[in-house]
Image (cartoon, helix red, strand yellow):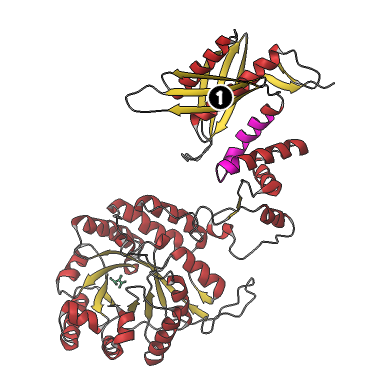
Amino acid sequence: MMLKMKATGNHASHPSKGFKPLEGSVGRRIEIMDTTLRDGEQTSGVSFLPSEKLQIAKLLLEELKVDRIEVASARVSEGELEGVQKITQWAAKKGYLDRVEVLGFVDTPVSVNWIVEAGGKVLNLLTKGSMNHLVHQLKKTPEQHFADIQKSISYAQEMGVSVNVYLEDWSNGMRNSPEYTLSLIEFLTKQSVKRIMLPDTLGLLSPKEVKAFFEQIVAQFPAVHFDFHAHNDYDLSVANVLEAISNGAAGLHTTINGLGERAGNAPLESVIAVIKDFTDLEIGVQEQKIFRVSKLVEQFSGQHIPANKPVVGENVFTQTAGIHADGDNKKNLYFNDLMPERFGRQRKYALGKTSGKANILKNLEELGISLEKDELAKVTQRIIELGDKKERVTTEDLPYIISDVLQNNSISKHISIEGYHMTHSKGLKPTVQLRMSIHGKFYDEIATGDGQYDSFMRALKKIYKTLGRELPKLTDYHVSIPPGGKTDAFVETVITWDYGKIFKTKGLDPDQTVAAMMATEKMLNIIENMNYQPTKEESTYYGNQYRTVAG
Ligand SMILES: CC(C)C(=O)C(=O)O
């Protein structure tokens, strides 16, 4: 028998753990086998290119430092063969070949030959862990199945390939046919097998059952290395993993971002956080690298990470309520062990209608901007207004908002856009129906143009014409979005006007045309201020900037 013994060792308690570790969780080192490239790729719609597989494999083994990776199923395709070859060629040079595993079937000699051709050295042999699967899928007796398994193991050995064994549908087996399932384990302990891998194939177990099954199995086979392979159908994969390792499992299977069949596998990012914070078990994974790897897998898999996904989701280290930011300023009142820096991330403070001054100050600090008290109050007010329109304003939006608000401050508002209706249809020119208020009086016009903004300007010109007034000449029109490339970000439109003097106005809105209309409204008020001979307290225009004229 070649079963790997579980390692034991001393382990000092994590200083931040103010609680008793779960029973049975002190001092062992847990092996992490990441199966992003095999079970993760079984996510509907995911297919990694060979070169992508190689890049992910490198990051998993060298940066994250997981113990083992499962990179493919044997026999799948030519592309899969190429992907495994790329990984094994690289792994051979690095001395990692015994950490690169391939799932294969009880089909001597096909899977083993495929793995050998791919340059692999480890077979994860898929056997049937429940009577149900054995009888209804393979239509074999346990004796026949055991004989076939023995043949596969012997052939792999002959070919220089080492073997771990999966008991597919093990969880069902433990529930409904434990005699068969335990007899298979018993049989495997007498074979040349390194690890026995116990999948909750349908993700049907509760933490209580995982605990009971592991207690039973580990008591019966104390020298055996058992891996647990969880699925997330009830959102219990992480809780189940915690029970498995706390009750004797020596290894775990995970995927990055929880990719995998149906609801996915146990997500590596949460699993490592939970092991570090809730047990005194040891793992070799480098958690600071997790975010980088998670983003790369997101990109290659095309599976967007939900914003609220623990550890790696966009929003999970963003405080939205102002009271939290305030608490962070006052003795870190909202501190917990799950610090973003651990995972290569940073805490953020959201800007929106619930965020308040403390959040804005935190963001200004990050940007190195300081504002006067009254300016801060105005910026806060503007963010609240924007928050009412759009849920979140980002730090990157802030400089635009500040400049927008401060510019607006210094201008008395006599003219406003009271209402508009814009059309944009294929085959027809855009039309804008516009209502303006000028010194309290309403003016309505409709115009058609080459674009929505052009239509708006034409309607505006008609109104101004009826008043016998001229508009400045538009000489430049510049649109930009804050860095980050988000399509839901605020758009800043800067328009340059020639009214004898050259000046610029800015508008900011998630909609580009609306941003341009806001910039235009500001321009109208500026020229109105110019024409109006401002009073002492009114704003006026000097050169290319606006100042309040003090008394
Ligand atoms: C193919 C097998 C090993 C599997 O992924 C599972 O049972 O969950």
Residue 471 shows up from this direction? no
Q: Secondary structure at mark 1?
A: strand
The quarter of the picture showing ligand 1: bottom left
Q: Residues within 10 Å of mark 1 (few under 14, many from 20)?
A: many
Q: Residue furthest right?
A: 551
Q: Nearer the viewer, residue 431 or 135?
A: 431
Asked whether 446 or 201 is in front, the reply is 446
Is the magenta region chiefly helix, strand or loop?
helix
Q: Quadrant of the N terminus?
A: bottom left
* Amino acid marked by disc 1: Val
Q: Is mark 1 within 8 Å of ligand 1?
A: no
The C terminus, quarter of image: top right
Q: Is residue 380 left or right of residue 221?
A: right
Residue 193 in percent (x, y) is at 29, 81
Circle 1 residue? 494
Query: Is 388 included in the stretch rendered in magenta?
Result: yes
245 is higher (above) or lower (below) than 531: below
Residue found 15% across the figure and 83% down from its top: 140
Q: Give residue 548's quadrant in the image.
A: top right
Q: Is residue 420 left or right of residue 156?
A: right
Residue 457 against residue 125 in the figure, above or below:
above
In percent of width and height, residue 4 lies at 36, 82
Residue 85 is situated, as x and y percent measured from the top left of the image, at 25, 58
Q: Which residues are magenta?
A: 386-406
Note whether 71 is above or below 532 in the view shown. Answer: below
Vertical relation: 452 (above or below) 357? above
Residue 350 on image: x %, y %: 60, 48
